[in-house]
Structure formats: structure tokens, C-alpha cells
Amino acid sequence: MKALRLAGPLEDESPHLSRLFELGCVGMVEVAGAAGPEVLAYFERIVPVPMEGSWETVDDVDYVAAYRRHLKAVRVGPVVVAPSHRRVTLEVGEQVVWLDPGRAFGTGHHETTRLALAALGRLDLVGRSVLDVGAGSGILAIAADRLGAAAALGVDSDAGTVPVARANARLNRSRARFLEGSLDHAELPDRFDVIVANLHAELHASLMEAYRRRLLAGGSLLLTGVLARLTDVVAKALPADASWRLEREGAWVLLHATLGGGAGPVAP
């Protein structure tokens, strides 16, 4: 077993570290280093990685099994995200999404995923269409389907995540569909009632015109994956006729924008 030692701390499901799972990482732990927290990312073999770190040989341990033993269900509004080995008791109105840790971003434990799930849970999705951009594990599209959406689709430009999302949909007997690509995919319907995306601020800004073209007038645009200090990067890219409000958890925010609803921020 090989371990890649990186400067820490371990921020669960951060985009920086989640990329390692796509490259074959089977588990991570935070350890004390000489200069502060460090992360050990475990691999079956040494692979090229897009970040600085040092490789070392460690004893073989089933780190995925160890991680699963400690993984618990997460409740976010009416959605309960649970690993398949846990039992959960649902309250009236709650919907469960079964999701095991894997090589795709999004298990419900990171602030950005929780912000997106909470925002979806506050909407009345019954009879509405939802598009998840950068779907990763598929958690948001599957949750939208569970919450009553008439159609839930996810797109992701990473070919490796699409089979993961489809497998998670099958696990949940969900009608959510997933396609490799982005907002310009030929198989997407022209417009959606809701678009949700858990990406980084600069990418949201670059996709804003494509979001606008795909969103029905009066529809909801839910944008997270944004560090609070970069809120203006996204807000300034919103169309002139957009009204928006901000949700925050820790260092992360979600912008809930409505196009055609007037300009500027709306008081909470």
C-alpha cells in the first residue's frame, strides 16, 4: 500500500482532495506533522497526481472499511443521506437517499452538499424539472427526484463519475438520469425549472450565460461550492434582472437566484 503525504488539514470532500479519489485513492486520514496537520491519502500504487506531496510505503489496511464503519446518516431538511450499511428511521415527510462513499464528489457530509440539499428541500419540486450541473455522485439529482421532481437530470464532464451516479440512481430506484457533458449536451431539454450546481466560484461565473439559457423565467438557480470571500465573483456575473439571497454554512455559501425577479440581493 502506498500513501501520499500532503499538507493538511483534511477538509472532508474538499474539491482539492476529492480529485484524488478519481485517481484511485481508497481512503484518507489526518495526521500530525512537524509543521501542522497533514493528510495521508492511500493508494494501491503510485500514480501521477496534480499536487505536491511525498510518497511512502505503509502497511495494507482496508481504509474504506474503516471509513464506512464511522460514516453516519446526515439529515438535511427533508432529506436523509445514509450509507447502505446503516439503518435509518424516517420522520413523516422525510426521504432517504442511500449513498456509499466512492470515487465521486458528494456524500452529504460536506457543507456545500448540505447547502444544496437544504435549498432543494425548501422548494416545491412537485411537477418541476431539475438539472444538476457537475453531478458527481448524483446525490442532488437523486434527492430532487425523491422530493417529487417530474424530471431530474445530471450532467458531468468527468466520464468517470457518470457510471457512479447511475449506479447510485439504481441503488435508490431513482428515475434521475445522468449524462456525460455539460449545459450544451444535445440530449438536454431546452429549459428547466431549477438548476443546481456545486462548483467553484470562477466556474459559476463562466457558466452564467449558459445557466441563463437553460433556466425558465422565474426559475431557481442554486449555486454553491462558493467560498464566502468569493461571493462577489458569482453575484457580479448574475444577469441584471436576477434577484438573489445568500445561505451560509461555515466558510461556504449558496446563492439562490431567481431570474426575472428584479435586481440585486434579497434580505433573508
Image (cartoon, rainbow, N blue to C red):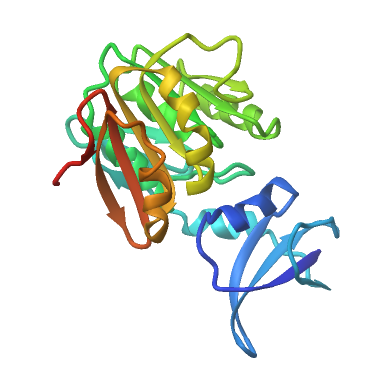
Left or right: residue 88 versus residue 36 is left
Residue occupying the far left of the picture: 267
Percent position of residue 168, x then y: 54, 29
Quarter assignment of residue 28: bottom right
Q: Is residue 111 visible?
A: no
> Is the residue 248 above or below the residue 173 in the image?
below
> Is the residue 246 above or below the residue 30 in the image?
above
The residue sitting at 60% across, 68% down in the picture is 29
> Is the residue 256 above or below the residue 183 in the image?
below
Percent position of residue 113, x then y: 41, 45
The residue sitting at 54% across, 36% down in the picture is 137
Q: Is residue 202 visible?
A: yes
Image quarter of the N terminus: bottom right
Left or right: residue 40 versus residue 216 is right
The residue sitting at 48% across, 45% down in the picture is 107
Percent position of residue 255, x then y: 32, 42
Left or right: residue 111 versus residue 244 is right
Percent position of residue 182, x then y: 59, 25
Residue occupying the far bottom of the picture: 34
- In the foreground, 158 or 105: 158
Residue occupying the far front of the picture: 240
> Is the residue 139 above or below the residue 54 in the image?
above
- In the foreground, 170 or 6: 6
The residue sitting at 50% across, 30% down in the picture is 133
- State how many labels appear: 0
